Image (cartoon, helix red, strand yellow):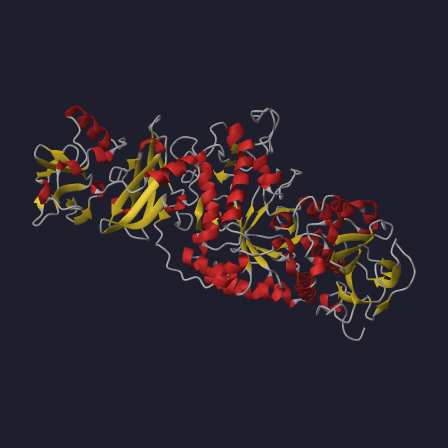
Amino acid sequence: MTNSQYSPQPMAAEFSEAMEKLVNACYSDPFRVLGPHPYQKGIVVRAYLPHAIQAWIGTEPPQEMARSSAINLFEWHGKAKALPLPYQVLWEDKMGFTHYEYDPYCFPPQLSDYDLHLFGEGKHWHVYRILGSHPVIVDGTSGVLFATWAPEAERVSIVGDFNRWDGRCHPMRLRGLTGVWELFIPGLKPGTLYKYELRNRNRGSIHLKSDPYGQRFEQRPHTASIVAAKTNYLWQDRRWMEQRKQFDWLHQPISVYEVHLGSWQRGENGAFLNYRQLARQLVDYVLKTGFTHIELLPVTEHPLDASWGYQTTGYFAPTSRFGSPDEFRYFVDHCHLHGIGVLMDWVPGHFPKDTHGLAQFDGSALYEHEDPRLGEHRDWGTLIFNYGRHEVRNFLLSSALYWLEEFHIDGLRVDAVASMLYLDYSRQEGDWIPNKYGGRENLEAIDFLRELNRVLHAQHPGVLVIAEESTSWPMVSHPIYVGGLGFSMKWNMGWMNDTLSYMSKDPIYRHYHHDALTFGLLYAFNENFMLPLSHDEVVHGKQSLLYKMPGDEWQRFANLRLLYTMMFTYPGKKLLFMGCEFGQGEEWNESRSLDWYLLNYPVHQGVQAAIKDLNHLYRSLSALNYYDFTEEGFEWIDCHDSAQSVLSYLRLKDGDFVIVVLNFTPVPRTNYRLGVPKSGVYLECFNSDSTYYGGSNMGNSQTIQTDSITWMGRPYSINITVPPLAGIVLRLKTPASKMPTTAPLSPGK
């Protein structure tokens, strides 16, 4: 070895200043003075050991290092050939314990210039593989490589149990002008608790932070990051992943069961179920009720249970509440092996102000905007990402890809997109800053969303990216090349609001509000819509879906089944929040399990049975799902019968069709003449008033023969009974058709 292999020795004046900064924990270049350096005709090794009283270089035999008692700096002088690389430092603390450690400051930089360049350009899609903490082997020595982005820090240190949480012990190396700090600490293993301690370069303020790229965290209320082991999980879902690449989601049934894992079911004494328990129990239930997908409220790590996961602090970590990252992999794998897709809520629109999180990460507005008119949601008490910074966009984009790649997630539902699109979202006049053209559009967020969708769809064909977007922003789910945002789908909040408002009214007044049900078809095909009856509709005093319905108990349940009949036959993919499928009576409460005991009662069993059969109907009849997003899949039969509050329409697919008739009053409509497109025999294949579902069992149990009577602009018509507060689905009987195995009426009626 030659002296040229070591970093140069600083001049005396520089060395003195550097050591003063090092001891005061405000030095940005610890490798300049620590570790091995050329010295005269040999080398000098320096180690700053704040808790040591004596130290040795780990040669054979060990050689004592000279100690400067004033600052606990230890030095060893010798010949280069006498020092093996890497080398150990042995030191004794005040309690008499001896520690054996490889010196972190004898290892070269680990991050490549190319990786750092891509990150600075915002183009490192897999930056989670280099930033954060990663078990690695360097020069035959195992340890953990830490890296974080903190351009306004004067000093960054890694702290943990291994160094008594003392920021003087392991200061990191700053990589030039990139703002990235790194340090390889040999000897550390997966499971190590750690944080970053940062000192701001301008104010000297100290900030103790969890790792933004951490892949595992302590359970709340503790907030330390945990070094995650490299996964050795053996995925079993190869067939699913291959088929997903060709998934024609535009023309396939998608029925989503929205779930909050912490309150779907709980174990003994109210304890959380773990990911493995949830996988088995939830998959069995979803298979029973017929949904195609599960959508998880955020499982990204979060400190507050009451936030439901939407106050995210760990954008790369499944919450530790339910187990380890590999146990979450098992959850997704188990779903896929049973034919169930997994979607998850993802929150790139804002983040919490928790002092251990992203807020003021290096003492500056790093991930957020400095000006609260751009950087704060006062209504939510959260901060807004600065989408104009390459590194921030890279952070979010990498997070999205992480979940798709590392956990095989089938799609992301992007939360609060409207809050990202508008600079004046939920703001008073004068409390926001216009864009460079004077408008209210957040141009940087728009660019980010388009880049997000471009990259995700290109890298992972078949995945879904769904926008929760509550305004009339145009072309949310249109391709980017025609000016759209590029999402797969958008939640149809207009349909949800209009429909629930209508359903909450006493039937005697519904004929005055008939257009609330028909207006939505004027824009139903402007976007690829998903129909959401989500968690947001059953909390904060809004009541459960069941208790939004008017009337006595019978009418409430009938109204609820009618609502679901409309939803599952209306254009658009479906989403239903947990508990709604069996008529949960109480509002959702994230702190306890759903009221599963209700399924001991026939009326709740009936709602669940109706959902099961509606899912089966929706999935088995292509006329109900193939053209969910285009006009060719829908025709009104009669949208004008406000006097009787009856709607009727066709769902179509290439000559095949089903008829849907909905009666929104408790008055049975007997001898109701309905125009139909073809002559023949019609059969009732679903009736929400069936006794099987808790209804009065009115309907059409026999075959229905068409009459050659022109009606409602149709060449033929049928005479039917439309049950009270109920919906029926009719299909033309043909020799080749196979009726779905639902139960329109109970036997003998």
Q: Is any part of residue 273 visible from this angle?
A: no
Q: Residue furthest right?
A: 709
Q: Is residue 181 above or below residue 438?
A: below
Left of 208 or right of it: where is 747? right
Q: Is residue 748 above or below residue 357?
A: below
* Nearer-the-camera pick, 409 or 723: 409
User: x, y (%) of residue 670?
Assistant: 88, 62
Looking at the rendering, in which quadrant would you find the C terminus?
A: bottom right
Left of 602 or right of it: where is 270? left
User: x, y (%) of residue 368?
Assistant: 47, 33
* Nearer-the-camera pick, 26 or 712: 712
Q: Please name the residue shown 13% across and 34% down the image.
A: 38
Q: Please name the residue shown 35% across and 54% down the image.
A: 230
Q: Please name the residue shown 45% across and 58% down the image.
A: 329
Indicate the quadrant where residue 740 lies.
Answer: bottom right
Left of 540 or right of it: where is 128? left
User: x, y (%) of residue 135?
Assistant: 31, 50
User: x, y (%) of residue 51?
Assistant: 19, 41
Looking at the rendering, in which quadrant would you find the N terminus?
A: top left
Q: Please name the residue shown 48% across and 46% down the image.
A: 400
Q: Is residue 535 above or below residue 424?
A: below
Looking at the rendered structure, the number of numbered marks drawn on it comes to: 0
Indicate the quadrant where residue 196 lies.
Answer: top left
Indicate the quadrant where residue 586 lies.
Answer: bottom right
